[in-house]
Image (spheres, helix red, strand yellow):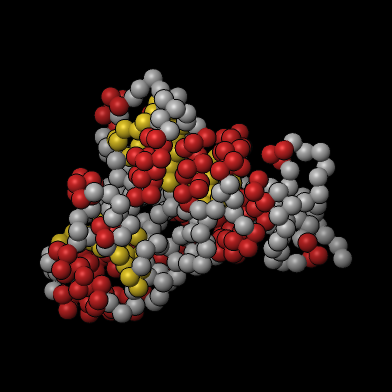
Amino acid sequence: MTTKSSSPPSHATDSLETRSVHAGEPRPRPSGALVAPIYQSSTYEYHGEDYHDVAYLRLSTTPSQVSVGRKIAALEGAEAALVTASGMAAISATLMAFTSAGDHILAQDCLYGGTQSFLRGDLSRFGVEHSAIDPQRPESWAAQLKPTTRLIYVETLTNPLVQVADLEAVVAFAREHDLISVIDNTFASPVNFRPAEHGFDLVMESCTKYMNGHSDLVAGSVAGSAEKVRRIKLTLDHLGGCLDPHACFLLQRGLKTLTLRVRAQNASALALARLLDSHPAVAQVNYPGLKGHPEHARAAALFDGFGGMVSFELEGGTTAAEALLEAVTLPTVAVSLGGPETLMVRPAAAIHSQASAEQREASGITEGLIRMSVGLEGTDDLLADLAQALEQVG
C-alpha cells in the first residue's frame, strides 16, 4: 500500500467546503482508511515528552483529539484549536486561563445563561470581577475599564435575541487597551463568520450545536494563536474537561457537512423570519437577515450568512406562545440548537430560567419570547406548519 505524504497538507487557501472535508485528517491515512479511526485508548507509549505533551486522553494529546482540533483550526482560520468536553468547558477553561483573583472582565450585557452564571457565581467566588457593557455603545466601554481588566468577552449573535455586537469596535478596543478579545461564535459557526480573520484573539464554539450538527454529542472548542491555545490547554489539563475519542469521531464526521448544513439552515431561517415578520399575530421578530433588524447592515457587511436562529414574540404574549408550541407539528419543544431537527423553546422557562425575572427583563427576555432553531426539514414544510400554527393562535 502506498501513501502520498507523511505529513498533513496545508488547507489555508482552500475553500471552506474543502477544509470541512480534508483539513485535520491524518496523513498518511491509517491502513489506508478514508475515515479517521476511533483511537479508543486512554494512554500511549512514553518517549520522554514534557508532562503536558504526553499522549494521554485527559491531556487532549491523543490522535483523535489532535486531528479534530486541526480541522477546527483550519475552519476558523486560526493557528491552533483545542477541543473540550463541552462548550462550557471551553468557556470556563479560557476565562480561568487568563484571569486570577483580583482581575476584571468586560462582558457583553446579554450572554448565554450558562456563561452569565459562571461569571456571576463561580468566577466571582474566585475573586474575578466582571462588568457588563452595552455591545452597541463602544463609546461607553472605557468607563468600565479597570487597571485589572484582562479581557473583553462577547458573542457573535446573542442568545436568544440574536443581536449583533459592534464586533469591529471590540477588536479595536481590545488592541488599544491591551486586552484579550474573546468571542463565542456558536450561533454563527465558521460558515457565517470567522472571528479570527477579523482580529479576535480567541474564538469559542459550543460544538454541540452547528459544528457537529446532529444532536448526538456534547463538545466545545477554542481556537486562536498556538501560544494562547496552549495556555488554555494547560488549564484544561487540570480541570479535566477533555473530549472522549468517540465524541471526537462524531464531531469530525459532523464537521465534514458543516457548510452544507449551515447554508441550508440560513436559507430556511430567512424564509421563516419573513413569514413571521409579515404575520399580524406576531409582535416582534429578531433575525439579523431582516432589513428591519437594528443591526442588519452590520450583519450583512460582516457575515456570510445570517444563521439558523430566530426568536419572536406573539401579540398574545405568554398564553399565545404556549399555544403556538402546542400547535406546531414539525418543531420539537426542546433546548439546544443547531441540529437537523427544528426546535422551539421559551427561554424564560428554560435556558434563562436561572436568571431572575428582573435580570431577564433587563436583558429583553420576556416571558412570551420563543426561540426557534431552524433545522434541515424542507423549507416549504416548515413554512406551512408555522403558518397553520399561527392561524390557530392568531
Which residue is the extreme one toward the top? 147
The N terminus is located in which quarter? bottom right
Toward which corner of the image does residue 236 lie, by quadrant?
Answer: top right
Query: Residue at image x 30%, y 45%?
Result: 110
Query: Residue at image x 73%, y 47%?
Result: 55
**Where does residue 231 sit, x and y in percent of width and height?**
58, 35
**In this view of the protein, which residue sits in the foreground, 288 or 121?**
121
Q: Is residue 198 visible?
A: no
**In this view of the protein, which residue sits in the foreground, 17 or 27?**
27
Note whether 86 is above or below 216 in the view shown: above
**Where does residue 242 sit, x and y in percent of width and height?**
59, 50
The C terminus is located in which quarter? bottom left
Note whether 383 is above or below 267 in the view shown: below
Toward which corner of the image does residue 40 lie, by quadrant?
Answer: bottom right
Query: Residue at image x 65%, y 53%?
Result: 65
Q: From the viewer's perspective, is 101 left or right of 320?
A: right
Which residue is the extreme one toward the right? 1
**Where does residue 272 sit, x and y in percent of width and height?**
29, 68
Q: From the viewer's perspective, is 337 left or right of 18?
A: left
**In this view of the protein, which residue sits in the foreground, 201 or 54?**
54
**Where does residue 170 sit, x and y in percent of width and height?**
38, 35
Q: How many marks?
A: 0
**In this view of the protein, which residue sits in the foreground, 108 or 191?**
108
Q: Is residue 143 visible?
A: yes
Query: Residue at image x 48%, y 51%?
Result: 87
Q: From the viewer's perspective, is 199 left or right of 367?
A: right
Note whether 35 is above or below 181 in the view shown: below
